[in-house]
Image: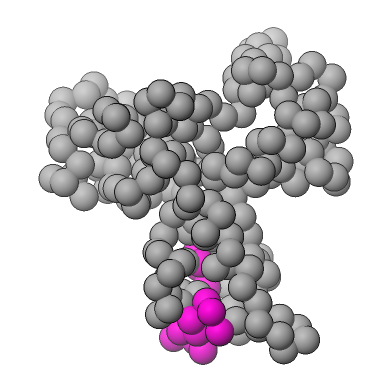
Amino acid sequence: MIGARNLTFLKSLPVCLEFPDEKLRFVHAEWDKKAIDSLHENGILDDQNRVKFGKWPELAQDGLGHKAIATLVTGTEIPVPPEGYFKTPDGKERHKARLKWWEGNPNNPNLTNGDVLFDIPPGTEFAARRINDNVNDEGKPDYTIRNRLFELQQSEGITVFGHYWQEGEFPKIESPHAICVDQSVAKGGYLAAITVENGKVVSSTSVKSRELPDKGQSPSAGR
């Protein structure tokens, strides 16, 4: 019964939240306006950005809905060449790397794959390669990463997200337009919170796992 109640509660939550007047957005992993618009256009989300009753089975199947939801809750993954393969802690080999969509300026000609992709082996030619020099299987220029960064960083205001487990007591400012508040509370880390005014983070607070809050700190001091 407890599991059923928890599932009902989770299904009642919005997939994402946006407050235009405050220039503030919330999403689990990655804010992608095209994905959100697609979910609305296909009748999957209601006007409060909740998955409509009866639409959950559709999201479990391959298709536009599944892809859009996956982007919001797990983020963009980029296929990598063999030298970019890596193994997870449980030994599984991965052929895709998660994109740090908030990281780096896509206008920077020296931005590398290693700068913007999680977990790829450091010291490899692929990690050191500039994103503008990537090529596809046919040897043609591949601007997937650069274009994705442009697309995801163009919104004004700030996106608050989690998913990507961070270390340390206080959230750090990932970029002028994004901040991650996942301080690994499930692994004995911290439960983090921030205060936002006019689209800017003005303070942050953390609570040690299973402890009462005892301190707060400004973003600059907590970085």
At which x and y percent is residue 14? 60, 22
**Left or right side of 47 for 180:** left
Q: Quadrant of residue 115?
A: bottom left
At which x and y percent is residue 65? 79, 38
Q: Is residue 81 visible?
A: no
**Left or right side of 108 for 47:** right
Residue 105 belongs to the span the image colors magenta: no
Q: Residue at x 47, y 44 (%)?
A: 155
Q: Is residue 190 visible?
A: yes
Q: Nearer the viewer, residue 30 or 2?
A: 30
The relative height of residue 48 versus residue 166 in the rendered view (above or below) is above
- Give the magenta range: 117-133
Quadrant in the picture for the N terminus: top right
At which x and y percent is residue 9? 62, 14
Q: Quadrant of residue 53?
A: top right
The relative height of residue 53 versus residue 133 in the rendered view (above or below) is above
Q: Residue at x 28, y 36 (%)?
A: 200
Q: Residue at x 37, y 26 (%)?
A: 22
Residue 124 belongs to the span the image colors magenta: yes
**Left or right side of 61 for 41:** left
* Total marks placed: 0
Q: Nearer the viewer, residue 47 or 68?
A: 47
Colour style of the rendered protein structure: one colour
At which x and y percent is residue 62? 85, 46
